[in-house]
Image (cartoon, rainbow, N blue to C red):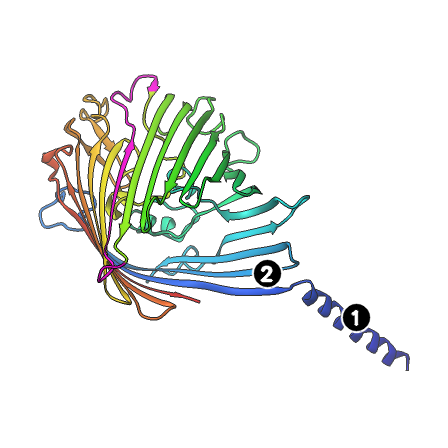
Amino acid sequence: MSKRLILLMALALVVGLTYTAYAEVQNVKVGGDILIRGVARNNFDLKNSNTAGDKEDDQTSFATSNVRVRIDADLTDNVSATVRLLNERLWGEENEYNSDIDLDLAYITLKEFLYSPLTLMVGRQELRYGNGLIVGDPDTNGSASSASAFSASAFAAVAADLSSRKAFDAVRAILNYDPLVLDLVYAKVEEKYVNRNDDVDLMGVNAVYTLDKATTLNPYFFVTSLGSNRDGQDGKSSKVYVPGILISSSPIENLKLSLEGAYQFGREVVFNAGRLRAFAIQAGGEYTFAKVKMTPALGLVYTYLSGDKNPYDNKNKFWDPMFEDQIPNSIPNALFPNSGAQVINVKGSIKPMEDLTLLANYGNYRLSQKIAENDPTLGYPALFGNYQIWRMTGKKDLGNALDLSAVYDYTEDVQLALDLGWFFPGKAFDKADGRRTANQVIGSMKVTF
């Protein structure tokens, strides 16, 4: 009899624990997406082949998959947890990097924490403020984390800009004083060695004030710091202070306008050593002809990112890209850092069918300042990019870019796309290297579930 009683009590305990575990979760939502790409890229070095008939450095083709699975759990009315897993890999590569499932998101949200206006978010989460000019991607939009499958593969140079990684390890305190919302953030961008002062940190405040139904003011102040013991810095620390403001307005129906200005000061010891004094301006507008057949839309964006005439003095005027998340054009985004250039983008789109959208984006690129004429290493002024160090002529004409896209909504959950891109190098590049046109074709399928 005693054995039966013990067995019954044990069963009751298991049922009770199971019931308690489920009772503490009010709602669980599972979702995600799968993005498959086929990519062909040519002449991304912008140069002639090193050997006659050798196209190894000029042409590449590959397929990638970006897979994400997300779980959102509501524990109580004010407590929730989010976890997202990520796998990024090149097809045909099977190793420890490509097969890994990485942690992409893992954060806790506490609403009405301590008092009703305060929401606390703690853990690995995406941060994106404004148009992504300052904060949006921890390794900038054109690169990928060293933990990424892409950066660990043999095709790191051609796939880094296709990474889906955007998350920061961060703590956010969001104060909602409608119509004012304050977002205070601290993020540990990189922890190199725990026992050294060599970390990369981000902290700041982002404010959004809804002036009226048409206008929003978005002032912000961010600080990024780099520890003084980081390799190659001679014990000097780097701190970049960035005050700025984004103004967004829709003065009439279907018209969107924005103007952003930011200033950087402090000391920079990585991107270009010296006393930092840099600035950025970005203005844009888009109008949708909602009542016209095929719903055409036109847009214009101007971006100015300051440069430096002489990178060898102690004054640094190069705009620090920080953690930008912008794609003016696809190929320049993969090739060049988001600094030292002025860009004019003219965009347009039409919908010839309900489920089909055609888009075009032309970009004109010029250097903000002529690059110094006497590089001590190469004997030429040089532009440092993700692919090469290019010899420059001292002129400002960087080149022109064109992106054409067709996006077809096969169903509500399945989207097919074809993207074509070109970059035509300008007179700023040394003609002796060839000034070859870079181009790419990307076909993709995305399923959201």
Q: Is residue 371 magenta?
A: no
Label 2 sits on a secondary structure element that is: strand
Residue range (magenta)? 291-315
Q: Using the rendered image of the protein, determine whether residue 312 is visible from the camera's viewpoint.
A: yes
Q: Is residue 310 magenta?
A: yes
Tag 1 residue: 13
Which amino acid type is shown beneath numbered disc 1? Leu
Which amino acid type is shown beneath numbered disc 2? Ala
Q: Position of residue 79 (x, y in %)?
A: 64, 54
In the displayed structure image, the side of residue 411 where residue 117 appears, left or right: right
Label 1 sits on a secondary structure element that is: helix
In the displayed structure image, the side of residue 184 where residue 317 appears, left or right: left
Up the image or down, 315 lies above or below 435; here it is: above
Of label 2 and label 1, which has the lower sequence position?
A: 1
Nearer to us in this view, 100 or 415: 415
Q: Using the rendered image of the protein, determine whether residue 273 is visible from the camera's viewpoint.
A: no
Q: How far is disc 2 from disc 1 in space, using C-alphas? A: 25 Å
Up the image or down, 59 lies above or below 225; here it is: below
Instruction: Decide whether the magenta segment is chiefly helix, strand or loop.
Output: loop
Question: Which numbered tag is attached to residue 58?
Answer: none
Question: Which numbered tag is attached to residue 73?
Answer: 2
